[in-house]
């Protein structure tokens, strides 16, 4: 299944409390349950003013629908076409 990287511009994201992040996670999971098993949240990275999320979904439209239903920004959605790491150099 295709994977997507979602960039969410959220000012102050890096200062969100654990309770804030729990609430965001719960909302996301609730929307995922509504949309069904064809979309999956893999993980997210929280930085100063952004959250970067990795999702598996059949298409970008479903990723954007998740964002719309959850009230989350999806400023940039990019399909992941490959993954590299230090072992790629071997």
Image (spheres, grey):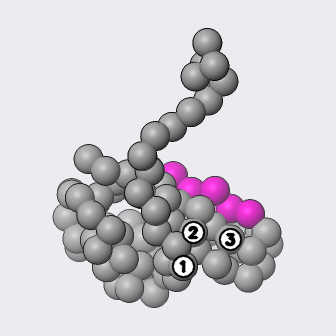
Mark 3 surroundings within 10 Å by alpha-carbon count, few (fewer than 14), some (14 through 19), many (20 or more):
some
Q: Position of residue 59 (x, y in %)?
A: 27, 64
Q: Do the residues labelled 1 and 2 touch (CB within 8 Å)?
A: yes
Mark 2 surroundings within 10 Å by alpha-carbon count, few (fewer than 14), some (14 through 19), many (20 or more):
some
Q: Do the residues labelled 3 and 2 touch (CB within 8 Å)?
A: yes
Asked which secondary structure carries label 2, the reply is strand
Q: In this view, does 75 lie to the left or right of 29?
A: right
**Mark 2 highlights which residue?**
7
Q: Is residue 31 visible?
A: no
Q: Where is residue 52 in the image (x, y as percent from the top left)?
A: 59, 62
Q: Which of 69 and 18 is in front in this view?
A: 69
Q: Nearer the viewer, residue 1 or 11?
A: 1
First-in-chain label (1 vs 3): 3
Which region is colored magenta? 41-47
Q: Distance between the residues labelled 1 and 3?
A: 10 Å
Mark 1 surroundings within 10 Å by alpha-carbon count, few (fewer than 14), some (14 through 19), many (20 or more):
few
Q: Quadrant of the C terminus?
A: top right
**Mark 1 highlights which residue?**
75
Q: Distance between the residues labelled 3 and 2?
A: 7 Å
Q: How far apart are marks 1 and 2 (CA)?
A: 6 Å
Q: Residue furthest top?
A: 90
Residue 31 lies in the magenta stretch? no
**Mark 3 highlights which residue?**
50
| Quadrant in the rendering for residue 11 | bottom right
């Amino acid at each position: 299944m295709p994977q997507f990287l979602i960039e969410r511009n959220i000012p102050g994201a890096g200062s969100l409390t654990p309770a804030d992040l729990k609430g965001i996670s719960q909302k996301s999971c609730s929307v995922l349950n509504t949309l069904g098993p064809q979309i999956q949240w893999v993980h997210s990275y929280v930085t100063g003013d952004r959250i970067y999320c990795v999702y598996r979904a059949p298409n970008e439209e479903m990723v954007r629908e998740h964002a719309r239903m959850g009230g989350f920004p999806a400023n940039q959605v990019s399909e992941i076409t490959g993954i590299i790491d230090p072992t790629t150099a071997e």
